[in-house]
Amino acid sequence: MDSSRRGTRPAGSWVESHGRSCAVSTARERCSFGPAPTALELEKLQSLTTTFRVSNVDPEQANAVKHERLVELMEETSRRGYNLPRLDGSIHRTPIPGSYVANMTRISDVNPLVPEDLTRAEMEGRRQAMEYARFLSDCVPGYGQATLDWLSTQVGVRESRRVIGEYTLTRQDVLEARKFEDGIALCGAPIEEHHAGSGTRWEYLPPGETVAIPFRSLVPQDAPNLLVAGRCLSASHDAHAAVRSMGQCMAMGQAAGTAVAQALDEGVDARDLDVTHLRSTLVADGAILE
Ligand SMILES: Cc1cc2nc3c(=O)[nH]c(=O)nc-3n(C[C@H](O)[C@H](O)[C@H](O)COP(=O)(O)OP(=O)(O)OC[C@H]3O[C@@H](n4cnc5c(N)ncnc54)[C@H](O)[C@@H]3O)c2cc1C
């Protein structure tokens, strides 16, 4: 945005992008689930994860352990008294020598909108991180001298409240790699569902294909001058499981911010803006929409 368009406009439009979509939730009927979700909604909700880091890893030995072998070791040792709820988690080297970050823990049956549930999840995630670190240190080559030296500051929430927008992206849209005239971002990521239980469900788009995220999925129904961006967009459980990744959330943020600037210029509500113009601005700014 050039300096003449920065910081001098009346606050006429809002972009909400803090994951749990609070402004929109003041009207519960505009959200996909609220403080009292149905049993089915809760059952389908993605699990939470506390990530953690271990240091003092021997990289030569650790890097030789392929993911398939790590999974085998988790399966074997979970039968020998290690309490590992997720058996297909991953661990990743970092730029710091000997320092590895793990995405392994799994906390299920949590409603992330209920403080007591989140407190329980924080405690359970930390307990699990210590157990997975014990597993790594005892059972996986290269981790014998490793120590747990960091926990994520907060438990990671994959899925919670989403708006009901002018369009709700669906599972079929994703798997058929559908395009929309008001597409403001593209997503090639698979449906990645961290459900309760030991595995993870992956469903891929056709090879090389992408699904578009329509601008209407950022526009909440009946909420003037408000857009959302990121994981509170309007999408079904499965579609959300594909488009919630970081790159797509950043693209939605860019689109929503650009839309608000354009709406102010045009003197219209963001939902009524010229979407062809929005798309051409995004492309001029480097977005890939085709
Ligand atoms: C364990 C885990 C692993 C993941 N791994 C990957 C991965 O490998 N690759 C990938 O692409 N994606 C991954 N994801 C998904 C991805 O990280 C998130 O879906 C994405 O970051 C969501 O972006 P967001 O902008 O919607 O929300 P967030 O990234 O949660 O950003 C919301 C921001 O709003 C702030 N905020 C909250 N409340 C308020 C408030 N009231 N006022 C002001 N600010 C507020 C928060 O502090 C935060 O900074 C992972 C998610 C989890 C939980």
Image (cartoon, grey):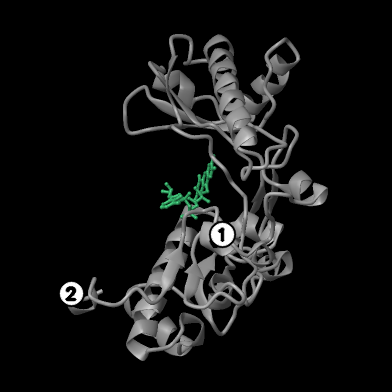
- The picture places residue 21, in percent across and down from the top left corner, at 54, 58
Residue 218 image-quadrant placement: bottom right
The residue depicted at 27 percent of the width and 77 percent of the height is: 9
Disc 1/disc 2 C-alpha distance (Å) = 29 Å
Q: Is residue 48 left or right of residue 101?
A: right
Q: Is mark 1 within 8 Å of ligand 1?
A: yes
Task: Decide: few, some or many residues near mark 1? Use Cα within 10 Å; few <14, some 14-19, many ≥20.
Answer: many
> Camera-side residue: 149 or 92?
149
| 194 relative to 207, above or below | above
| 38 relative to 10, above or below | above
On-image quarter of the N terminus:
bottom left
Circles 1 and 2 in contact, beta carbons < 8 Å: no
Q: Residue furthest front?
A: 26
Label 2 secondary element = helix
The kind of residue on which mark 2 rests is Ser
The residue depicted at 23 percent of the width and 75 percent of the height is: 8
The answer to whether residue 105 shows anywhere in this view is no
The residue depicted at 50 percent of the width and 25 percent of the height is: 64
Residue 149 image-quadrant placement: top left
- The picture places residue 42, in percent across and down from the top left corner, at 75, 46
| 197 relative to 75, above or below | below
- Residue behind mark 2: 3
- Residue behind mark 1: 232
- The picture places residue 208, in percent across and down from the top left corner, at 57, 65
The kind of residue on which mark 1 rests is Cys
The residue depicted at 72 percent of the width and 10 percent of the height is: 81
Q: Reading the chain from its start, which is encountered first: label 1 or label 2?
A: 2
